[in-house]
Amino acid sequence: MNTQVPTSLPRPSLRLGGTLTRLTVGGAAYYALELACRGYSHWSMALCGGLCLDAIYRMNRRLKNKNICLRAAAGSGIITAVELACGCIVNLSLRLKVWDYSHLPYNFLGQICLPFSLLWMGLCIPVCAVCSFVQREPRPKIGDTATRTDRLPTENEKC
């Protein structure tokens, strides 16, 4: 029997705890960004921010070998889609008037617009970089023989 204890366990990537962390961090970060830029925000923006960060994290994992600009464009698409869905519910259906892009060029229903989609793309570059950093595989330490925990011990390793 192998009595060595692994020095590091593989990190689960998409467990519920990780998802709740991403939802919380994304929601708090976007809410804080709105407070800093506009001076106010709405609870629905925290929800959107959390959903966006979780979706971007998952997209970044799937496209990990692609160019950062492509991942940022995909992230911008995610944010714009979530913003449209949230805007249709919060602004158009519930009439809460959280935001209105109707005065901006290339807007759709006053809920999304090209200038903000481009802004989201710029914001996604550092977000994707941070997601890649968090998703990186832990490297084994030099001399660490207990890096593989998913195999049975060989005859030489048995007691």
Image (cartoon, grey):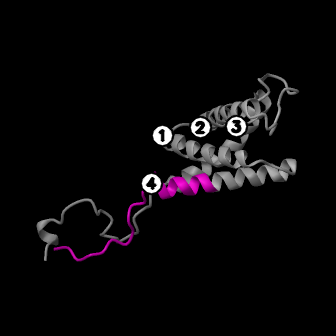
Q: Are marks 4 and 1 in contact (CB under 8 Å)?
A: no
In the depicted view, which residue is nearer to us: 51 or 128? 51
Which residue occupies 51% across, 43% down? Answer: 58
What x and y, as percent, mark residue 136?
A: 49, 54
Q: CA distance from mark 3 to mark 2?
A: 9 Å
Q: CA distance from mark 3 to mark 4?
A: 27 Å
Write down the residue under mark 1. Answer: 62
Up the image or down, 52 lies above or below 156; here it is: above
Write down the residue under mark 3. Answer: 121
Q: Name which of mark 4 and mark 1 comes first in the sequence.
A: 4
Q: Which residues are magenta?
A: 1-24
Describe the element under mark 2 as helix, strand or loop.
Answer: helix
Q: Name which of mark 3 and mark 1 comes first in the sequence.
A: 1
Residue 71: assigned label: 2
Q: Name which of mark 3 and mark 2 comes first in the sequence.
A: 2
Q: Tell me if mark 3 has few (under 14), some (14-19) or many (20+) residues whose alpha carbon lies within 10 angstroms of its own.
A: many
Residue 63 is inside the magenta segment: no
Q: CA distance from mark 2 to mark 4?
A: 22 Å
